[in-house]
Image: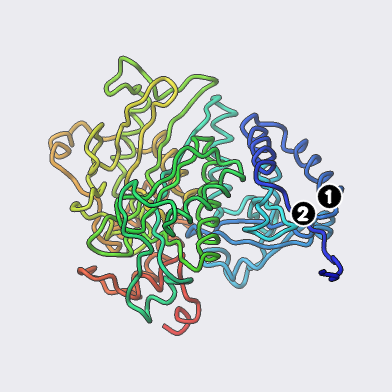
Amino acid sequence: MDTTPVLRDFLEIPYDQLEVMNLKAKEQRLGRVDPEKIKAERVKYLEGEKRIKAVTVCFTDLEGRLHMLDYDKKFLLKSHDNLTFDGSSIRGFSQQAESDLRLAIDWPAFYWLPADVFGPGKVLVFGEVLARDGSRYEGDMRGRLKQYLADLFEKKGLVCYAANEIEGFLFKGRDAERHFHETGKFEYVSTGGYYHSLPSDPLRQFIDAAAEAQRAMGFGNEKDHPEVAPSQFEMNFSYSEAVIAADQYQLYKLLCRQIAARMDMTASFLPKPVVGINGSGAHTNISVGKGKTNLFYDAKGQDGVSKLAWDFIDRILNSGSDICLVLNPSVNAYRRLDPHYEAPNQIKVSAIDRGSMIRIPLGNEKSARIEVRSVGPDTNIYQALYALFRTGFEGPTSDPKDDAKRSRTRFLPDNIQDSIRLFKQSKWTTDLFGESVATKFAELKLASAERCPKALGTMVKSAEVQFHHEVTNQYLWNHF
């Protein structure tokens, strides 16, 4: 008989109950419940729930990496209006001389967590990065996206929606990416193929565990399955308001990585970790609504979408090369833009051709949308959605004089150096992000590119994995 005294009584919530709680929180966000009312609810809950020990506050850096700070619950309740952190330690954020940044709590973006994944006694909330004076920090793309969409709703009653189809690979061993410079290879856990994996296969067990955790966190799962390449997976969740969709994108990758590590494997979101097979994308479906009306739908419109949707398409295609670096922000991403593997590298739109940058899926009044297929899974999703929606609404339109030129097939850049050059030369990207952020972003991408061979070749090089922004081994980076 175990007589060990129980010293800890931390919160652990069953998955079915978690799903109910997280879906209710999502409904509050979708219903635009007053954030101050939600803040009062959350503070009261944290004060009353004695089994919570810590609150995980998340934010995303300029390159798209998710950062997490665990605050003691009692400290957070006393100091949530004065949280600071060292921004100079975050690549792409403030310089050493101006290092202090603030974190504000986005109380509606609150999640109850599966205890077997995150540990018992924790809840999670997204933060907003602020400058020293309390103003919105320009390098926080989540804050930029949130503010832009809030202004659209306030001024025009428009709501922007998004959903991502995020593909990834599952490899044997923990930290397989960080050990790539030692092993020179990734090992598949399954070689089944599209839609095929036995229930007992490691890939299927991983997908089941990840999907269960996503469901518990209120993602609104739709389907999950092995993808075309060996050991490749995709798990889809429901269409939502764009900031919610982006938050779920970040949590999706976090959950996948944590669950894979727990199973002694690695969930990788490199766009093309293995040459000779299909790469991974994050096809991004977007639409715009007003009230209950989908403004991208028109039964009589070409391919079933409206003039607004076609204007969006025209502006995105017109700036396709300029924003390519945002959608494909790594050396490795340009291996994926290879026409031999269903690569969406053609700057055109099609209802059927999957080599097109933009596809128009078959839809109805509820589901009509456009699908931007050239987005890589390692994009900063807040930056990508901000770029797509602002470009769709405000970007430069094509010049009718260019129709003859546009009738020829044009392609996205096939290497990051060209992509950086086009990004830096573009007046639109400077207008889009501001000179300071655009310059910082280009510098970060160039720093990684210069650590890698310029020619991609037919073999994945260690440097393009090791110095990838989501993988970076800080020790090797500092000793380059």
Amino acid carrying label 2: it is Leu
Residue on which the image places disc 1: 49
Image location (x, y in percent) of residue 259: 54, 60
Q: Nearer the viewer, residue 372 or 152?
A: 372
Amino acid carrying label 1: it is Glu
| Quarter in which the C terminus is drawn | bottom left
Using residue 195 as the reference point, say whether residue 83 is left or right of it: right
Q: Is residue 13 above or below residue 291?
A: below
Residues at circles 2 and 1 in contact by the CB criterion of under 8 Å: yes
Residues at marks 2 and 1, CA–CA distance in whole angstroms: 8 Å
Residue 247 visible somewhere in the drawing? no
| Quarter in which the N terminus is drawn | bottom right
Image location (x, y in percent) of residue 105: 70, 50
Using residue 288 as the reference point, say whether residue 291 is left or right of it: right
Identity of the residue drawn at 31% across and 59% down: 191
Using residue 273 as the reference point, say whether residue 144 is left or right of it: right
Q: Is residue 453 above or below residue 307?
A: below
Residue 348 visible somewhere in the drawing? yes
